[in-house]
Image: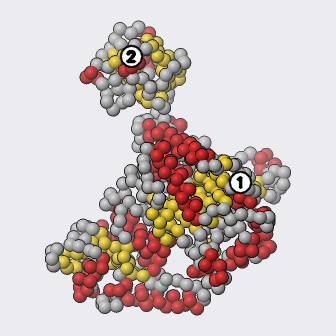
């Protein structure tokens, strides 16, 4: 019996029709001589009834049914009695009275119950991923991913972009993470690399005259997995010629507005908030701030000198010494920072709760977390607890500066490194947002982070490194001081942030071969090494390369956030677990010696 409709299509308008349904037994209930079967496919659920007067043969077959048996049913569509209508089901006004029943395939005892969402542990879900994917939640999220991907292609094509595939086997180049290497059978000792991104190839496409490129690109990075990261992932890769930063940002805003309207019928802002990298760190302690709640970080430095709290004074003194020492090396750093966070209405926080917040701050290298509570009355507020005795004389000024009120909790981090103070207190802010249930997954707060540093100093190796990658354009006002003051150089870089996640990253690229050489030199790539690693790109730049730039939104993270989840495993059909292993097919796995011999590879056993 081949289906002629789906389990989600029937309504009371179909009453009286004879239909054939194929699907899986979702639930089965027996009431006396009547059996009710909820039959499921990816379109929905329809109730099938084996009536009391059904043939004995069909009743016997129905008695065999268990959850997830795959069956076919032919029957009459009829309306349900008013008292049995299920308003929670799209097909809740009808049922199908079975006339014929066939078991297409039986199902063994299930390792976990298939429902809207599985409560099984992750490894069990991934071992039986084909069962987990049958759940309503996974079916909806995979559909959402499909819809988002289609919306991307629809909008990009409508805007004149070409979808062009770039190679999967490429030259190994340093791009920040370890490459996955593929040995060549024909060329022993040589390897292809799987692309960490199509970065170099999309720039070459710009040199080739394809001024609007995009690709739903598969990317591979050999790095530790986490909730929003996988060894293989998908990005919406985009590059454009003859553009500046505002063109890229405007294009991306248009794309996302279309995606959310098309797939969720949501009107997100047509222009997103913009913050500089420095502003984001100062206000939120992160270059990917969660803006679904406020609670900005505030400067507290001005109250330290008049206080008696030596720990804060020592942090400032040490920071000044470190700044002077760095200045002597030609490196500009911010020095010390004392930052405060007002937590509205949480003066009742217990010492244990504050200690949990302090533990979070220490993860990010803070020495500790100071605190005070605003108590008393609205007319006569006082500071109590924690370090309040050192700042009692400045109560009025502190409350006015911070905007703190009676019943609020004030948290403070001081460090000789302003970046550490910001980052540690930013982590506390984020924990508070989650603990206080301020991170509504149905809200979508976008922000552009711009004006990133182009370089960062590696203390261990005593050299400058590219903060993002070596192909980003330094903002024009810094070209004359690239070599003399790399630490102050801002790049034409931009990240798109959504709900505390970096959703996309991009930059205006370097198209001038001479400027590219200067960047290589600053980060320690000598000409021979640069030619060996990137010669094919710099060679292309000599042939009339246009100004160009691009961006690469992460498709997995986007769908994850749209679905209200915190792990991209929930929106990928066959992800790896936290150890980069697939429990379903047990990869990575050993291969035959014959295969190794063909590739001229020997496995060297190492002690654990």
Which of 54/146 is in front? Answer: 146
Q: Residue at x 27, y 72 (%)?
A: 409
Q: Is residue 386 left or right of residue 513?
A: left
Residue count near mark 2 (Cα–Cα under 10 Å), binned few <14, some 14–19, many ≥20: some
Left or right: residue 507 versus residue 25 is: right
Question: Is residue 252 visible from the viewing direction of this image?
Answer: yes
**Quadrant location, the C terminus:** bottom right
Based on the displayed image, in which of its 4 quarters is residue 61 positioned?
top left
How would you rate the neighbour count of disc 1 (Cα within 10 Å): few for under 14, some for 14-19, many for 20 or more?
A: some
Above or below, 451 relative to 602: below
Q: Residue at x 59, y 72 (%)?
A: 491
Residue at (22%, 78%) from the top-left corner?
384
Q: Mark 1 or mark 2, which is nearer the start of the sequence? A: 2
Residue 403 at x, y = what percent?
Answer: 28, 75
- Residue behind mark 2: 15
Q: Which mark is residue 521?
A: none
Pick whichever, 417 or 498, lies toward us.
Answer: 498
Q: Is residue 76 above or below residue 352?
A: above
Residue at which label 1 appears: 210
Q: Is residue 40 above or below residue 96?
A: below
Q: CA distance from mark 2 to mark 1?
A: 56 Å
For residue 79, above or below residue 310:
above
């Amino acid at each position: 019996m081949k289906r002629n409709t789906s389990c989600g299509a029937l309504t009371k308008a179909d009453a009286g029709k004879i239909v054939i349904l194929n699907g899986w037994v979702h639930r089965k209930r027996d009431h006396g001589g009547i059996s009710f079967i909820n039959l499921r496919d990816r379109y929905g659920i329809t109730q099938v009834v084996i009536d009391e007067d059904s043939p004995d043969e069909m009743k016997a077959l129905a008695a065999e049914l268990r959850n997830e048996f795959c069956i076919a049913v032919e029957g009459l569509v009829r309306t349900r009695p008013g008292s049995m209508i299920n308003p929670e089901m799209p097909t809740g006004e009808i049922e199908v009275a079975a006339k014929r029943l066939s078991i297409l395939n039986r199902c063994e005892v299930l390792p976990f119950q298939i429902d809207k969402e599985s409560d099984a542990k992750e490894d069990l879900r991934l071992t039986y991923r084909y069962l987990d994917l049958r759940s309503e939640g996974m079916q909806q999220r995979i559909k959402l991913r499909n819809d988002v991907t289609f919306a991307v292609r629809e909008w990009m094509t409508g805007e004149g972009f070409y979808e062009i595939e770039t190679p999967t086997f490429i030259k190994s180049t340093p791009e920040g993470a370890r490459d996955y290497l593929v040995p060549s059978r024909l060329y022993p000792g040589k390897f292809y690399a799987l692309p960490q991104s199509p970065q170099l190839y999309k720039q070459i496409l710009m040199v080739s005259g394809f001024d609007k490129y995009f690709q739903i690109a598969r990317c591979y990075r050999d790095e530790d997995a986490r909730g929003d990261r996988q060894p293989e992932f998908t990005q919406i890769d985009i590059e454009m010629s003859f553009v500046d930063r505002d063109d890229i940002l405007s294009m991306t805003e248009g794309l996302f507005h279309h995606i959310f309207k098309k797939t969720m019928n949501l009107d997100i802002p047509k222009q997103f908030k913009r913050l500089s990298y420095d502003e984001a760190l100062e206000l939120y302690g992160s270059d990917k701030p969660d803006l679904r709640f406020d609670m900005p970080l505030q400067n507290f430095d001005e109250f330290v000198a008049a206080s008696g709290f030596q720990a804060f004074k020592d942090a400032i003194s040490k920071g000044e010494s470190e700044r002077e020492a760095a200045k002597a090396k030609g490196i500009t750093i911010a020095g010390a920072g004392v930052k405060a966070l007002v937590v509205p209405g949480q003066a009742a926080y217990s010492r244990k709760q504050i200690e949990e917040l302090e533990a979070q701050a220490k993860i990010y290298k803070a020495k500790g977390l100071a605190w005070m509570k605003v108590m008393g009355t609205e007319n006569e507020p006082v500071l109590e607890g924690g370090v309040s005795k050192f700042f009692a004389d400045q109560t009025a000024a502190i409350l006015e500066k911070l905007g703190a009120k009676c019943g609020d909790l004030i948290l403070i981090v001081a460090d000789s490194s302003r970046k550490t103070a910001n980052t540690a207190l930013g982590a506390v802010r984020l924990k508070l947002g989650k603990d206080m249930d301020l991170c509504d997954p149905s809200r979508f707060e976008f922000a552009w982070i711009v004006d990133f540093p182009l370089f960062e100093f590696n203390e261990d190796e005593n050299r400058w490194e590219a903060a993002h990658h070596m192909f980003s354009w330094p903002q024009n006002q810094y070209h004359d001081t690239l070599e003399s003051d790399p630490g102050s150089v801002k790049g034409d870089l931009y990240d798109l942030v959504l709900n505390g996640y970096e959703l996309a990253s991009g930059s205006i690229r370097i198209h001038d071969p001479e400027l590219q050489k200067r960047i290589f030199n600053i980060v320690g790539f000598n000409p021979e090494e640069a030619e060996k690693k990137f010669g094919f790109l710099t060679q292309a730049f000599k042939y009339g390369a246009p100004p160009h730039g691009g961006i690469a939104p992460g498709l997995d993270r986007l769908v994850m956030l749209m679905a209200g989840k915190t792990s991209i495993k929930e929106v990928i059909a066959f992800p790896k677990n936290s150890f980069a292993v697939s429990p379903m097919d047990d990869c990575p796995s050993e291969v035959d010696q014959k295969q190794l011999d063909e590739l001229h590879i020997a496995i060297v056993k190492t002690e654990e």
